[in-house]
Image (spheres, helix red, strand yellow):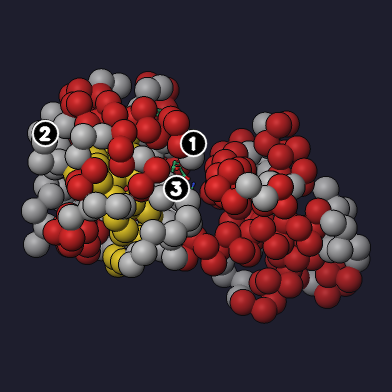
Amino acid sequence: MSQLKRVAVIGAGTMGRQISLQIARHGFRVSLYDIDSAALDAAEQAQRAIVADWVATGRVYASADESIFDSLSYTADLASACRDADLAIEAVPEQVELKRAVFARLDRLLPGSAIITSNSSSIRISRLEDATERPQRVANLHFYLPVWDSPMAEVGGGSCTQPQVLDGLCDFVRAIGIMPLRVRRESTGFVFNRVWRAVKREVMRVADSGVASIEDIDRAWMIKFGRDKPPPFAQMDRIGLDVIRDIELHYAAESGDPDDLPPPLLTDRVERGDLGVKSGRGFYDYPNPAWRRDDFLDPDAAIEPGPLS
Ligand SMILES: NC(=O)c1ccc[n+]([C@@H]2O[C@H](COP(=O)([O-])OP(=O)(O)OC[C@H]3O[C@@H](n4cnc5c(N)ncnc54)[C@H](O)[C@@H]3O)[C@@H](O)[C@H]2O)c1
């Protein structure tokens, strides 16, 4: 049973809208905040489409629709999102200074007992904790996309996070249908994101150096690991290529190794505004990406050398 009942989710982008929906679906009150009110409108629209699909496919009862949206509120006023919240989950872009500024504001506006967490993909919480006056009550709480189909969240503390804070977060994520994955020692990228990062980095290097095409790498992945889930380049398109770029830049800043910088294959697309599913084009074109086509795995197509960019 979770003691954390009221939640503020900060940032209504790809992750904030999914995290807040998963929380509301489990009956907790959640307030979704963004600096951009258009992002809030887009989030509500996307959430209503997801819930309609859940109802149509029998994933939730039709009556759940109303109760989910009764639990959710949307606001462009941070103070009102924070009032009475027991827990804040920050999901703004992957930039240390931006997250520190958000943490400092949350610290001023939340009740003293509230826990502040970051959904960061790679940033250790000890890089953010001293932006607040409550470093013992901050933690990493990292969800995966899609939140309900990858029901796992890494939970990890910083230099002085109280163990009961981490226990409370584990109880909370269990209460919203997610398995907590405890990070026993601070680590850039935590647990599974380190593994996924190695995959992303290597497939981009293989394609960027001209060894194989994006499509052939994804084909190989699907033949080896199964056809029902997006292969690596398709998954990066779902996440957002700007998000992937920011994560890679964070790893490079931490290591100081130029070899960790994101390759042109990625940065050129971000500069062109080709951000993946959200912009309609990334490594693939949407809404009907080639990797989803029935003939994508056709052996004749697989031996054709595809374009490298
Ligand atoms: N996309 C993924 O699959 C994924 C998965 C796990 C973790 N993450 C992490 O979650 C975080 C958010 O990623 P995303 O994909 O949702 O990004 P996104 O770009 O889709 O959304 C970010 C949102 O934050 C808002 N924002 C920017 N500055 C803000 C501020 N000062 N206050 C409030 N809102 C602000 C933006 O308007 C935008 O709506 C990042 O740290 C990312 O690394 C992303």
Q: Residue 200's x, y, as percent?
A: 64, 59
Observer-side mark, 2 or 3, equals: 3
- Confirm or reject: label 3 Cβ below 8 Å from ligand 1: yes
Quadrant assignment for ligand 1: top left
At x 30% / y 52%, what residue is drawn?
Answer: 159
Q: Which mark is residue 108?
A: none
Classify mark 1: residues with Cα within 10 Å, few (<14), some (14-19) or many (20+).
Answer: some
Tell me which amino acid carries mark 1: Gln
Tag 2 secondary structure: loop
Asked whether mark 2 lies closer than 8 Å to ligand 1, one says: no
Q: Tag 3: residue type?
A: Ile
Q: Quadrant of residue 9?
A: top left
Q: Which sits in the foreground, 65 or 120?
A: 120
Whole-percent x and y of residue 6?
14, 42
Please report whichever mark, 2 or 3, sits nearer to the chain's N-terminal start. Answer: 2
- Location of residue 275 (image quadrant): top right
Give the residue pinned by disc 3: 123
What secondary structure is marked by label 3?
loop
Q: Which of the image's four quarters has the N terminus?
A: bottom left
- Circle number at residue 111: 2
> Is residue 149 in view from this perspective?
no
Q: Is residue 264 visible?
A: yes
Q: Is residue 288 above or below residue 57?
A: above
Drawn side of residue 273 relative to residue 23, left or right: right
Q: Secondary structure at mark 1?
A: loop
Q: Are there few (<14), some (14-19), or many (20+) residues within 10 Å of tag 2?
A: some
The image quadrant that residue 143 belongs to is: bottom left
